[in-house]
Image (tube, rainbow, N blue to C red):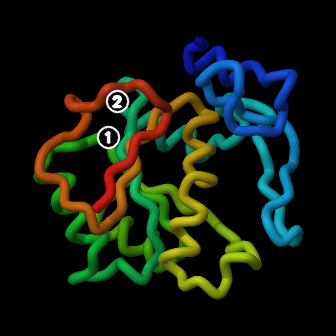
Amino acid sequence: SHNKDQAREQTCPSCPTCPTCPSCTSPHIPNEVIPLQGGNSTFMTNEASNDASNPSLAEILSKVAINGEVLVAITDGALAGPSGMLKTWVECVRKAKVTNFLVVALDDRAAKFLKGQQVPYYRKEVRIPASQQNVGANHAISGMKFHILREFLTLGYSVLLSDVDVVTLQNPFPHLRRDSDVEAMSD
């Protein structure tokens, strides 16, 4: 069994493109381009795990994360606004006294809303793969979440992923087992 840092530094010689090594339970980050289903898109894998790979996200996380951990929601502007789910999510997280959170804003509308609410956010440009273009925006976003979170992991942060329709009643961090890189809350 490897710890998380060792797993990030090595790839399994018998399975360099798979997400987990068959001889242990540790995740591996492959160092190559993997074609997605349909063959029209690719998933770019990470070569480096340092701040230089994404300096803007590294800067935000250095200010927001506590003990290398962060609560993350991912959304577009469809859920932003004075009575939108994103506002409710932010209010609940703040009432629960969670300070190490941020939102990945997938468009300018979400980013503008978050800035106005003084919410830490990371503006991420995304391209919906051809295989996901007819499934609806919310499903397409769900399909990209873990690809987006990979940027956080390669910088060495642990992520608690939350949908914006999840109500947070208390700070979840004291209750985590911390036995994985990504933990998720779902409804």
**In the structure shown, which secondary structural element does the residue marked by tag 2 occupy?**
loop
Q: Considering only vertical position in the picture, is 48 above or below 13?
A: below
Measure the C-alpha gap from mark 1 to mark 2. Answer: 6 Å
Q: Position of residue 93 (x, y in %)?
A: 21, 53
Mark 1 Cα-neighbour bin, 10 Å: few <14, some 14–19, many ≥20: many
Kind of residue at badge 2: Ile
The quarter of the image holding the C terminus is bottom left
Q: Quadrant of residue 54?
A: top right
Q: Quadrant of residue 38?
A: bottom right
Q: Which residue is mark 1?
A: 100
Q: Position of residue 57 (x, y in %)?
A: 56, 45
Give residue 8's mark: none
Q: Which residue is mark 2?
A: 66
Look at the numbered discs 1 and 2 and tell me whether their residues touch, using CB distance below 8 Å: yes
The quarter of the image holding the N terminus is top right
Q: Position of residue 104 (x, y in %)?
A: 48, 59
